[in-house]
Amino acid sequence: MADSLLLLKRVPSRHTWLRARKARPQLILSRRPRRRLRNLRWRSRRRLRRRLLQAQAAGADWLQGGCLVSGAAALRRLKTSARRRASSPEPAEDPVPSGPAILPIPPVRPAGSGRAVLLLPLGQGFTFSGICRVTCLYGQVQVFGFTISQGQPAQNVFSTYTHSRLTINAVHYSVHEKSKKEMKREARVLLRPYLNQDDRYCLMSSFSPLCSIVLLERLKTSTVNFIISHPGLSYIFVQEVRTFQINSEYFALRSVGIRREKKKTGLRLTESAFAAVEELVSISSEEADSCPVILVCGCQDIGKSTFNRYLINQLLNSISCVDYLECDLGQTEFTPPGCISLLNITEPVLGPPFTHQRTPQKMVYYGKTSCKNNFENYIEVIKYVFSSYKRESPLIINTMGWVADQGLLLLIDLIRLLSPSHVVQFSSDRSKYMPDLTPDFVDDMDGLYTRRRSRVRNRGFHLPEFAESLEFADEEKESPVMSTGYKLMFVKSEFVTGKTSRNRESHNRILRELAVLGYLSQLQPPVPKPLRALHGLTPYQVPFNAVALRIIHADVAPTHILYAVNASWVGLCKILDDVRGYASGPILLAQSPICDCVGFGICRGIDMEKRLYHILTPVPPEELRHVNCLLVGAVSIPQCVLKSQGGLEGTIPYVTTDYNFKLPGASEKIGARESGATYKERGHPKPKFYRKTY
């Protein structure tokens, strides 16, 4: 009993622990001293803390060679340095540190509600997750390859959970022979509208020459608000995790909507990637007469899309616009999936694809996320879209990640078809073997529809009629399609992805659904107006005899084609045929046309009595006047749109547990919808398509 009472008396009081906790952030200890500190009694612990604080106040060096040292070693160095100062009257020169220089952490100061000011020394970076609006107040910074200078407009930056974290890096800028005092005076004047006197003094105490000051503001867009309004999707932009660093910086960044991340989680490109980007930017900036055509190829999940975004941003630093040809059907960059498009990019790309959906210069709705079993139509569509390229700016061509077997032969056909001036080939240690696509290798290989050069020369005949139809210019029609000389550039990728062979399909499906949601967000009013539910928006009424119908990816019986069209993702297209001569509808097409697509929409209802389609789309009315064809493909509406409709009472439209999947055109193959067994396993109801509106 006496021993237990004695132990109780030795337990430190709450007041003692509070004092120790206040002193803890001022100490820098390694792991071993911290372990020893836990094993000490509370009186010895308190005595040791007092000594450490006294040593720190006396100016002891806690960092040596980039490694944390113990308190005992710091005390020994303190006594040794004091003894040396007493013995030598002249001050000794500062020794040159042997290890790497330890840069200070960039300070962050709150600048009001939803704003923060970040100071970045030259060579420093700030890696973060979340979304914000970045304005360079002083100096020059670079985000994802795009340079933001003082006086330029603010940029919306999206560092999402689905992709690599972005970093704001301070880069070198010209100061025109200004002194440090003049630079500090200019920076202090620029900070007056945002920080009070104490915060300005705290921030400017860390100011050094060639520093950059960045204003971070909270960002709210209709795209972000629409995506996070669906359950389970709010984590994409900001993930809430437990952190023990609760300080003023944490609350300042939290008010903006971002969080500091470790540098290793940020986007990192290899030296070969930087070298390829530097060379391509130099060629695009110097050659004014001929614009380079850059084809990027490699296996899937190796970093091609990330490289393309970085290259676009780097090119926009020196030229006004960049053309982009999308040949990847599954993971498109600027459009919903299943499209082949040509775009003219004039603004930087500072986020994943679902944050920058744009209107293409020319687009064709292919209707599927893969071109297998229909290569000829895929080649014809690329030829049709590529014919609109005017060669007035550099062109970046994104290809599929399927580079094995027939995919490799198809890639060889694309190289001969598009005649690139530069081919960037990605490879990595973990990817499957892919031969080097040198010009000699491509010339000596047969593609799916083109033949190698040796066979044409030796046998004395031209290519087949299909291959001969691949030329674009009139002066090239007299010669067969041959591989022109190009420069092959190798990029060794160390891109790390969370996708595996098991979850790759689910990852890709989520990214495709996010792209569709990003496109549908154009239906929402601009911020700060509140969101509107899709079932509350007024659709367009389209008569049956005004548009033609076609199911691209499957054969559907004419009697059941309206079941497949209702509640489906439809492409709004323009065909050359005139469909206004029919008295009634629906009008069905016998084959899939290759035609322009002006946008997409949802067929949210079919009125059989008035014979009307109810289409919900963000395409403006002046473009809709030219639409005379509706194409339905394998791209479906995300399930969260159908099941998470706010403001509805009772049964949710288009969602039911009673549906007959044996009807022609109602199986899981139509629109890539899940089967009844899958819905039952996941606990979701099966979708049913009514002929009534909401």
Image (cartoon, helix red, strand yellow):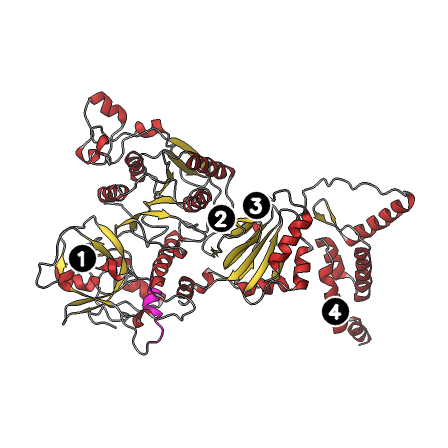
Q: Earlier in the sequence, mark 4 or mark 1?
A: 4
Q: CA distance from mark 4 to mark 1?
A: 76 Å
Residue placed under numbered mark 3 in the picture: 171
Q: Report the number of discs.
A: 4
Q: CA distance from mark 1 to mark 2?
A: 41 Å
Residue furthest to the right in view is: 87
Q: CA distance from mark 2 to mark 4?
A: 45 Å
Q: Quadrant of the C terminus?
A: bottom left
Task: Answer with left or right where residue 86 lies relative to residue 478.
Answer: right
> Which numbered disc, 4 or 3, marks the residue closer to the eye?
3
Circle 2 SS class: loop
Looking at the rendered structure, the kind of residue marked 4 is Trp
| x 8%, y 60%: residue | 582
Q: Earlier in the sequence, mark 2 or mark 3?
A: 2
Q: Earlier in the sequence, mark 2 or mark 4?
A: 4
Looking at the rendered structure, the kind of residue marked 3 is Val
Residue placed under numbered mark 1 in the picture: 628
Q: Answer whether residue 300 is magenta in the image.
A: no
Residue placed under numbered mark 4 in the picture: 17
> Are the two marked residues, 2 and 3, in contact with CB atoms closer than 8 angstroms?
no
Examine the rendering and report whether any part of residue 106 can be seen: no
User: Which percent across, then down, holds residue 314?
Assistant: 46, 43
Looking at the rendered structure, the kind of residue marked 1 is Asn
Q: Earlier in the sequence, mark 1 or mark 3?
A: 3
Range of magenta residues? 638-648
Circle 4 SS class: helix
